[in-house]
Amino acid sequence: MEFITQEYIKEQAQKGEMEALQCSLLHHQQGRDATRGELIDAIESEDFEMSAGFCACCKRYGPVDDCTTKLGQCLLYSDGCCGGIYKPIREEFRAFKNSLTKLLYIAFTEAESKVCDYIQGVIDKKQEKKPELRHGDYGENDNGKMFIILDGVIHWEEDSYPDGQRISPLPNRTIRPELVRGNIFDELKAISEPLTEFRYDHATFTLGKKGVDTGRMFIETDRGDKWWFDLTPDFILNLRRMEATLRSKK
């Protein structure tokens, strides 16, 4: 096996966050996949070590207490390096390095496998495509403040303004996509299209002639259960409030 060099590690650290993560993963994959003989040779030739000098992420962010520099915090840091599992693995490596036995080699490679799984999970999460925020998206943040996005600008509901405004454009804030409750223009388009019947969860929801005349909706399930509901604004609003409550608890 041809082990990656410290020069290569330094290059990848300078390229960017993803390159550093991929390089760190490769380092640990080589520790996991190398034969006992290959690993011994690499240790003796100083081509493999369990230290900050062989970690592209450490070179990029620095092996400081919380792995945070002007570039931000290392994505591998969570309750310690590599989710808190790096230190035990380093001890496994040191034990193997001191005696080079088959049993300690197995223990180390098994530990390396855990690090590889952790780093791969971080990479997979970073590569997930996040939904893009759109014109008309609205929702509520963790503190109960409402917002709407108009022409790329986030308008936040604030408690009060001297001129009596209820929303204010504050583009310097950010929105997590999971806070979005819906899109006002999608909803306006949907409600502008006539709908007299739909199926949902083994039931038929109908707005028949009587319903149109009286403002009531008729529901009949496949089991024969039947209900009438008054489609008042309060009823519809309360349903939407319940939906928002469910979404906020996810």
Image: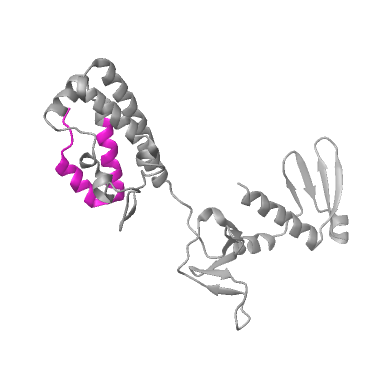
Quarter of image, res 117: top left
**Residue at horizontal 21 percent and vertical 39 percent from the top:** 54
**Residue at horizontal 83 percent and vertical 43 percent from the top:** 220
Residue 81 placement (x, y as % from top left): 35, 41
Residue found at the far bottom of this picture: 163
- Name the image quarter holding the N terminus: top left
Residue 199 placement (x, y as % from top left): 73, 44
Q: In front here: 65 or 72?
A: 65
Left or right of 185? Residue 240 is right
Q: How is the image coloured?
A: one colour
Quarter of image, res 31: top left
Q: Is residue 181 above or below residue 126?
A: below
Residue 77 placement (x, y as % from top left): 37, 44
Q: In front here: 195 or 33?
A: 33
**SS majority, magenta:** helix
Which residues fall within the magenta stretch? 1-29
Q: In front here: 156 or 188?
A: 156
Residue 44 magenta-drawn? no
Q: In front here: 227 or 119?
A: 119
Left or right of 213? Residue 179 is left
Q: Is residue 149 above or below residue 8?
A: below
